[in-house]
Image (cartoon, rainbow, N blue to C red):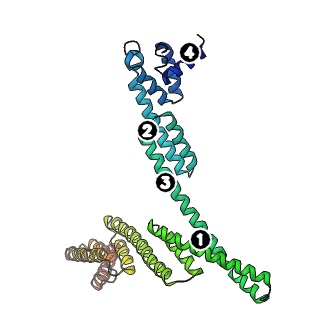
Amino acid sequence: MPGYLRTITLVFCLQYPVSCAFLIPPPESLDRQINLWLKEKQFDRIDSSLRQLESKKDVYSNILIRKPDIEREKMKYIEHVSKQAQILKSKQQWQQSIDLYKSALNNIEDQPRLSKELKELIIQRDQELSILRKNLLIKNAQAQISYDEIYHKLEQLVPNDRTAQRDRQRHANYKSALSIKLESCGAQALKNELMQLAYDCYSVSHHINPTKQKQYWVDKINKQLTHQKNHKLYAELLSQYNAAYNKKQYNQARLQLEKILAINSNHQQANELIKKLDHEIKSLISGKIRLGKELYSKQKVNEALQLWQQAQKLSPDNAELIQLIQRAEKVSKKIQSLEDRQ
């Protein structure tokens, strides 16, 4: 039998095993066909063929023994598809990513992982599409608002011109329709917790057709956005505080806390940290002053001076440190002068 007829027969028998129970190809032919399917990633056909051979394990043992290797190849293929699809998504190539999943699912029957990822991808794509369309709606409404001055001048120039009147009315009606769509956009965005989009929709709608209800949502959402923005800023400043504190850059650390308190003087964590930091700085300065005095009394003037200068970096306006440093510098200069003369 010619090769192409064997292939046709093989495929037919694997799809309709009852109709040709006695036409199952020999192991060698089936093995070659499985290799071809592996190359083409047609794992559904391979799985179907292997199930048909379960009743003939003795004859097709050399093929059935390949099942673990085939399963590993299938897992590698699934992993590859998943990875490549995510790369395409990251490049905003949404349709290519979807097509890749669909193509893979045509080759693998009932694959939960790829089916789930495809479903999630389509949901994300649709969400992105929805946001894009709403942003286009906002841009369109803003463009229409920008035409108001032109139509106003037109009315001043030719107040009784019927064509101009129709144009102005058409413009007003279109803006009114956009305002209704924007209000619906705001409500939907609010439901989906897309706060910036909700604010933009309500804000532009209110600009076109002001109402107390829209003003309420504009004010409320704006407060939430400000809170979210500040919360993010607090987290960044606290992170910078920790980094500076761990490096013992206490002044820099304190500056980050001061920035938080400048925004919100009642920020509990910042207030607690700055109180703790001030106490630590005060103890550190006191320790350096005390140790410096001990060194100074032992005529180790330069060592004492270094300690006091370190302490002054933490507290530049400390009167005691200023006095101690000035005195130590004078003594140090005298000592240096005496040494130079010798």
Q: Tell me: 102 left or right of 62.
A: right
What's under tag 3, amino acid-wise? Ile
Asked where in the image residue 135 lies, by quadrant, the reply is bottom right
Query: Which residue position is annotated with label 3?
Result: 123
Q: Nearer the viewer, mark 2 or mark 4?
A: 4
What's under tag 2, amino acid-wise? Gln
**Circle number at residue 111:** 2
- The x, y position of residue 263, in whole percent, is 39, 79
- The x, y position of residue 56, in whole percent, is 39, 15
Cα–Cα gap, marks 3 and 1: 23 Å
Answer with mark 4 or mark 1, whichever residue precedes in sequence.
Answer: 4
Answer with mark 2 or mark 4, whichever residue precedes in sequence.
Answer: 4
- Secondary element under disc 1, as helix, strand or loop, is helix
Q: Which quarter of the rendered picture does the C terminus lie within?
A: bottom left
Q: Tell me: 275 left or right of 101.
A: left
| Viewer-nearest residue: 28 or 79 | 28
Answer with mark 3 or mark 1, whichever residue precedes in sequence.
Answer: 3
The residue shown at (48%, 71%) is 187
The residue shown at (41%, 25%) is 69
**Circle number at residue 6:** 4
Query: Which residue position is annotated with label 1?
Result: 138
Answer with mark 1 or mark 2, whichever residue precedes in sequence.
Answer: 2
- Secondary element under disc 2, as helix, strand or loop, is loop
